[in-house]
Image (cartoon, coloured by chain):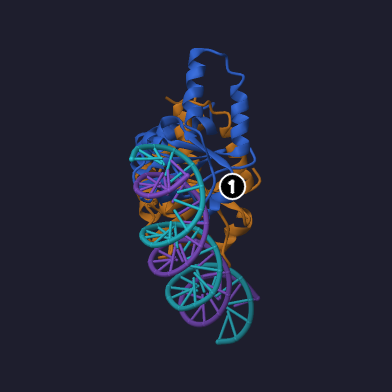
Chain colours: A blue, B orange, C purple, D cyan
Amino acid sequence: MIVMFMGEYHQKIDEKGRLIIPAKLRNDLGNDFVVTRGLDGCLFVYPKTTWEKIIESYQTLPNIKDARNFMRFFLSGATNQNFDKQGRINISNPLIKYANLDKDVIIIGVGDRLEIWDKQTLEKLLTENEENFSKIADNLFSPKLGG
Amino acid sequence: MIVMFMGEYHQKIDEKGRLIIPAKLRNDLGNDFVVTRGLDGCLFVYPKTTWEKIIESYQTLPNIKDARNFMRFFLSGATNQNFDKQGRINISNPLIKYANLDKDVIIIGVGDRLEIWDKQTLEKLLTENEENFSKIADNLFSPKLGG
DNA sequence: TTACTATCACCCACTTTTCCCCACTTATTT
DNA sequence: AAATAAGTGGGGAAAAGTGGGTGATAGTAA
């Protein structure tokens, strides 16, 4: 993995639907990237090259109904994006609805992608799962003792 | 393990969120390291090379919801850090909130990482668990006899 | 084809945040 | 006790974030 997105950034969507991508992330994204429906109620943001690799890997999925539906979900929401001169992007209405975005938004870096979350949704998710995290971490750090 | 962090250092965070890393620790950290949400209410500090190994081990996690959430928790809390000329770092707001950092902070060395604690939180944790440590140690070092 | 409307991107001005630098204080060493 | 190193606080320049206005473009209906 060449790009490694990290960090948590609190942003606001203005009345025109514009969202600032933090300056620190813009270089890694490049000026040509894709925003699409993500898993668990957020939006995924991929640099163009990463996106193309993902699409490629999906070609190998078997042509069964589940796979077709997943492709529909993933591809139909995808929008090409550029920055305006202020470093902002426009989130389309269907995506705003899908991720339930209100005014307060959190952008997080998760490895090869960014995720755009409604603030409340993400905070709820993280606090609800906090106990799980230490279990997962225990297993990762010392799998022989754990369990 | 090449670097071995040890010791306990009492520091203060100033109003701008700046925290001095004790001079004795700076060499071992290098000028490129990562601060992230740790377990049990503290922050972890890893030298870059150690961090990269950890990320590598996380690549083995399956793409299921629990694992995705864990990655969100772990990576969104991560921030690249450098020292300013005074040997300080900036702790971002989300991390200050997470670790409940007030003015008084304790930095401890724990093997391959540093941990940043709110003073009260750490002292409470240690006194509450003092009696248990010998039992815990017994279990950790001879798990077959324990339990 | 023309006039009207809605949308979008750009530009400008203002506010907020971040980062760097300097000066002072405290601690440590000899 | 002096000298050196480490810790601490604050000011200011530069960068980033924010909101609103304006003109261009495209779509629609007359």
Residue A13 in sight from this viewpoint: no
Asked where in the image residue B29 lies, by quadrant, the reply is bottom right
Residue closer to the observer: B68 or B25: B68
Residue D13 vertical placement versus B136 (above, below): below
Q: Chain of mark 1?
A: A
Residue closer to the observer: A21 or B13: A21
Residue at the image position 48 percent from the left and 16 percent from the top: A66
Residue B115 locus on image (x, y percent): 49, 49
Residue at the image position 57 percent from the left and 38 percent from the top: A112
Residue B28 locus on image (x, y percent): 62, 54
Residue B141 locus on image (x, y percent): 52, 32
Asked where in the image residue B105 lies, by quadrant, the reply is bottom left
Number of numbered callouts drawn: 1
Residue A25 vertical placement versus A49 (above, below): below
* Residue type beneath disc 1: Asn
- The N terminus of chain A: image quadrant: top right
Residue that numbered label 1 is attached to: A31
Residue closer to the observer: B11 or A40: A40
Residue at the image position 44 percent from the left and 41 percent from the top: A116
Q: Residue furthest top?
A: A64
Residue B131 vertical placement versus C14 (above, below): above
Q: Is residue B76 left or right of residue A58?
A: left
Circle 1 crowding by C-alpha within 10 Å: few under 14, some 14–19, many from 20 = some
Residue B48 locus on image (x, y percent): 62, 48
Residue A77 in sight from this viewpoint: yes
Secondary element type, mark 1: loop
Q: Is residue D30 left or right of residue A45?
A: left
